[in-house]
Image (cartoon, rainbow, N blue to C red):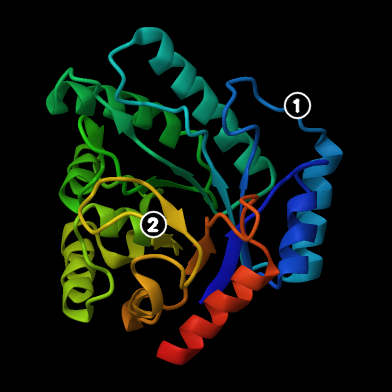
């Protein structure tokens, strides 16, 4: 596996590679702007070049850009919908600029408008956005944890979008262990994980699974509450090793999105714990 973490890009997007190297990462995930504000960051061209140079120097094997948490492609509100599309457009442009391997995003919620109406909105936006992705940069739907009108909590919903978008050649998925767990998929049980992997393969093709988010859960199985916990400190615990060691998931970027010791995100210690967990179960 390519072990990595979501890291800060404070001081310029190229600094994410420096932090990833310091953490002992093989892969890195980064926001291309503040995750809680619509205004995009005005990156300097030299920062893109430095990013690519440092990636080559460090041998970082995978780079993922994560979209804003504010994005909602299923929203019936026209202003929020347009902001979401514009924000994702900017994220994809930056991702292509640094030659990232993928952009990961949460689909959003139909906010009571209904699943069918939400799907129409999502597909309209995604067709437009997929055309911006270069040959290298994929667009990855992440499974969600939320309740209510959230779209993408199940593989069936992701497969519906995949089919409606005619299996676009750059469309893939990212699976989050915590989101699966709180959506009722017990990733600590090998037989249940086997069924999930088979479902991915049957519904979309396992080659469409391009990244993993490896997070323990602070919320119970099936709770639909998105609460990440540090490796070994949540309700999945040691059995998170079942997820990271599954034979058909090897070779993928395995990225941490955990709170860390001080609530400021993953660090070298969390990356070390992930590697050791994998080694114990592999």
Mark 2 Cα within 10 Å, few/some/many (few <14, many 20+)? some
Could you tell me residue 165's position as x and y percent?
26, 38
**On the image, numbered disc 1 is attached to which residue?**
42
Q: Is residue 75 above or below residue 281?
A: above
- Label 1: which secondary element: loop
22 horizontally vs 190: left or right: right
Q: Residue at x 27, y 22 (%)?
A: 121
Separation of marks 1 and 2 at Cα, in angstroms: 36 Å
Mark number for residue 218? 2
Which residue is located at x 51 percent, y 64 percent?
230
- SS at mark 2? loop
Q: Nearer the viewer, mark 1 or mark 2?
A: 2
Question: Compared to 242, does 37 lie above or below?
Answer: above
Q: Quadrant of residue 164?
A: top left
* Of residues 257 and 83, the one drawn nearer to the viewer in this rendering: 257
| Residue at the (46%, 73%) spot, across then down | 232
Residue 272's disc is none
Q: Which of 2 and 215 is in front in this view?
A: 215
Q: Is residue 225 visible?
A: yes
- 115 over 257 or under it: above or below: above
Residue 282 seen in render: no
Q: Position of residue 150 (x, y in %)?
A: 25, 34
Q: In this view, does 61 lie to the left or right of 207?
A: right
N-terminal label among 1 and 2: 1
């Amino acid at each position: 596996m390519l072990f990595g973490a979501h890291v800060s890009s404070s001081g310029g997007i190229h600094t994410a590679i420096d932090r990833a190297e310091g953490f002992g990462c093989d892969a890195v995930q980064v926001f291309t702007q503040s995750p809680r504000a619509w205004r995009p960051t005005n990156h300097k061209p030299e920062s893109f070049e430095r990013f690519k140079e440092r990636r080559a120097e460090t041998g970082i094997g995978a780079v993922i850009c994560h979209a804003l948490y504010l994005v909602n492609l299923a929203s019936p509100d026209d202003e929020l919908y347009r902001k979401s599309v514009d924000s994702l457009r900017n994220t994809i442009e930056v991702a292509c600029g640094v030659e990232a391997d993928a952009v990961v995003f949460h689909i959003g919620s139909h906010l009571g408008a209904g699943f069918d109406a939400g799907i129409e909105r999502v597909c309209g936006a995604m067709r437009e956005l997929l055309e911006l992705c270069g040959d290298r940069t994929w667009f990855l739907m992440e499974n969600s944890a939320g309740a209510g009108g959230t779209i993408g909590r199940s593989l069936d919903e992701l497969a519906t979008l995949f089919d409606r978008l005619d299996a676009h050649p750059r469309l893939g998925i990212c699976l989050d262990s915590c989101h699966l767990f709180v959506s009722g998929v017990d990733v600590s049980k090998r037989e249940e994980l086997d069924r999930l992997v088979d479902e991915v393969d049957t519904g979309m093709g396992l080659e469409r699974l391009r990244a993993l988010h490896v997070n323990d859960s602070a919320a119970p199985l099936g709770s639909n509450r998105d609460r990440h916990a540090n490796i070994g400190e949540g309700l999945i615990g040691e059995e998170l090793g079942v997820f990271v060691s599954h034979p058909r998931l090897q070779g993928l970027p395995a990225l941490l999105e955990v709170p860390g010791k001080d609530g400021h995100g993953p660090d070298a210690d969390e990356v070390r714990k992930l590697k050791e967990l994998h080694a114990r179960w592999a």
